[in-house]
């Protein structure tokens, strides 16, 4: 108790606040909805055979990711502190838990370093689409062009640097004027974009084939536990759980009693976006004679297949510009959310202030990102035994660090619940007014989450 008071006194500064519950929802949705929804999910849905993977994915969203989302935002909202302080506070001043809190912030920081590189590629493709459009005579030509861009280290560095400067400009404005305002503009724009693209996709010859592919079980070569683990890993990444963002965003709101419903709204929006983008992308793949119903993964889908498809449509620069701008909106809001916890952490613990903290964090993330960017260029300067730094850091953060952070949050939340530490600013016990069914759902799922997480590790280590 004594220690707990010490920790409370350590930082009396109050966290900045979003102006409304709607702003919290939009900004957290901005974090969740990102590249994972727009290119990873459609690929997974395609490669793992429609409902074969969608059903386990829905299961894990409902029973693992959403409860974790509620747990992490609640920890932030109840304590109004940064993850390191919040974890320490709920564990009576434990140094170990301070370290765990800090390591979740560090995970987000590492993610920001490579996420910025990809956001940079998208920015440059948006600029290219607007300025010249895409005029490839074949898929191969588009692939050659993309590889040429990637090989040129200067190209990647320019995009990555532009994204870092943009993030610096936005995040130095602070939480309300920068982060919140940007999401208030970008997210509604993003929703308009995806609905427009969905309507456009109805006109494609492959539209109904895509719908039927996604709504039935498809025979695939990918089967067994790999489907389950892909679905689980993706459910984690897409909701941004397991690193500092949700605790930090939670600390920016006092709308504690509505966190449960807000989380459901965000998860629903995130899933809807994933499904809509799957229909759009799979429909293009089925409509493209050259692709002939085959779908490539990750970058090649976005940077090779789509530009080649847009070239065949002769739609002018409008459609590709619109498309890449839309992907950019999703990426930049997620990138900001990966940077924010570190900035807030430094701002709260030092006298540097918001601007210098932002400069320090974004500068370091930029430097690390330069390594990631160069590692995938023809330089191969930062790659070991054929694995680039980019691949290494994205694998380690998503496979090990995110699940570990999520496991810690689940355990912390359960302990705080049982020891009645989840007290709202109004003095009432949090979630006490939630229907019994919802309480049971939350508690049981959080108890089961660490078991599922352990399964990921066992699989990653090759034991299962
Ligand atoms: N949720 C983001 C996406 O779907 C990824 C992300 C993870 C962003 C963690 C920030 C932190 O693309």
Image: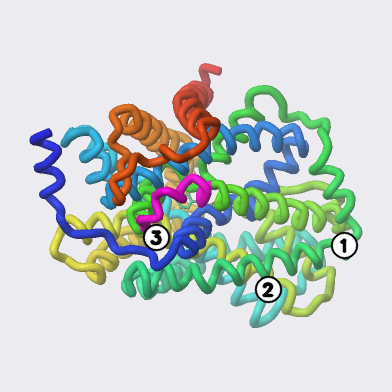
Of pointers 3 and 1, the one earlier in the residue sequence? 1
The residue that disc 1 covers is: 204
Tell me the crowding category of disc 2: few under 14, some 14 to 19, or many 20 or more residues within 10 angstroms, Cα based: some
Q: Is residue 315 left or right of residue 117?
A: right
Residue 262 among magenta residues: yes
Q: Quadrant of the C terminus?
A: top right
Residue at numbered disc 2: 322
* Distance from the alpha carbon under mark 2 to that under mark 3: 28 Å
Nearest-to-viewer mark from 2 and 3: 2
Q: Main secondary structure of the magenta part?
A: helix
Is residue 227 one of those drawn in magenta?
A: no
Q: Earlier in the sequence, mark 1 or mark 2?
A: 1
User: Please, what secondary structure does the residue beneath circle 1 have?
Assistant: loop
Q: Is residue 129 above or below residue 36?
A: below
Task: Name the N-terminal-most of marks 2 and 3.
Answer: 2
State the image coordinates of residue 130 (x, y, percent, origin top left).
Answer: 65, 80
Quadrant of residue 70 within the rendered picture:
top left
For residue 370, which numbered disc appears in the image?
3
Instruction: Name which residue lies at 32% across and 47% down.
Output: 424
């Amino acid at each position: 108790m004594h220690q707990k008071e010490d920790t409370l006194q350590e930082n009396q500064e109050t966290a900045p606040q979003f102006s409304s519950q709607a702003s919290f929802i939009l900004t957290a949705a901005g974090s969740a909805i990102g590249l994972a929804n727009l290119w990873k999910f459609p690929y997974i849905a395609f490669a793992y055979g429609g409902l074969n993977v969608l059903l386990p994915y829905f299961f894990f969203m409902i029973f693992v990711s959403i409860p974790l989302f509620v747990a992490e935002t609640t920890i932030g909202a109840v304590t109004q502190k940064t993850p390191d302080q919040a974890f320490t506070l709920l564990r009576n001043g434990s140094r170990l838990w301070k370290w765990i809190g800090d390591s979740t912030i560090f995970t987000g920081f590492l993610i920001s370093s490579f996420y910025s590189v990809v956001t940079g590629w998208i920015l440059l493709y948006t600029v290219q689409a607007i300025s010249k459009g895409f005029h490839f005579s074949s898929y191969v030509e588009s692939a050659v062009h993309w590889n040429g861009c990637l090989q040129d280290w200067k190209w990647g560095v320019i995009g990555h640097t532009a994204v870092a400067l943009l993030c610096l400009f936005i995040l130095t404005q602070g939480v309300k004027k920068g982060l919140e305002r940007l999401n208030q503009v970008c997210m509604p724009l993003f929703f308009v974009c995806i609905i427009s693209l969905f309507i456009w996709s109805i006109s494609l010859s492959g539209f109904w084939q895509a719908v039927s592919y996604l709504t039935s079980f498809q025979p695939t070569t990918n089967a067994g536990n790999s489907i389950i683990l892909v679905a689980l890993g993706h459910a984690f990444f897409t909701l941004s759980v397991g690193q500092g963002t949700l605790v930090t965003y939670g600390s920016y709101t006092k709308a504690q009693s509505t966190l449960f419903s807000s989380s459901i709204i965000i998860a629903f929006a995130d899933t809807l976006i994933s499904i809509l983008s799957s229909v759009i992308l799979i429909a293009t793949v089925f409509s493209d004679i050259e692709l002939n119903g085959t779908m490539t993964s990750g970058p090649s889908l976005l940077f090779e297949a789509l530009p080649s498809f847009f070239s065949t449509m002769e739609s002018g620069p409008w459609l590709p510009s619109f498309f890449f701008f839309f992907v950019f909106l999703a990426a930049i809001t997620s990138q900001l959310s990966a940077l924010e916890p570190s900035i807030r952490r430094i701002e709260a613990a030092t006298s540097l202030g918001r601007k210098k903290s932002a400069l320090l964090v974004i500068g370091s993330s930029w430097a690390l990102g330069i390594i990631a960017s160069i590692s995938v260029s023809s330089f191969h300067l930062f790659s070991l035994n054929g694995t680039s730094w980019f691949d290494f850091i994205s694998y380690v953060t998503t496979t090990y660090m995110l699940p570990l952070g999520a496991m810690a949050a689940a355990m912390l939340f359960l302990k705080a619940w049982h020891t009645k530490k989840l007290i709202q600013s109004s003095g009432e016990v949090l979630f006490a007014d939630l229907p019994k069914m919802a309480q049971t759902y939350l508690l049981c799922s959080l108890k089961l989450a660490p078991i599922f997480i352990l399964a990921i590790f066992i699989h990653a280590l090759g034991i299962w």
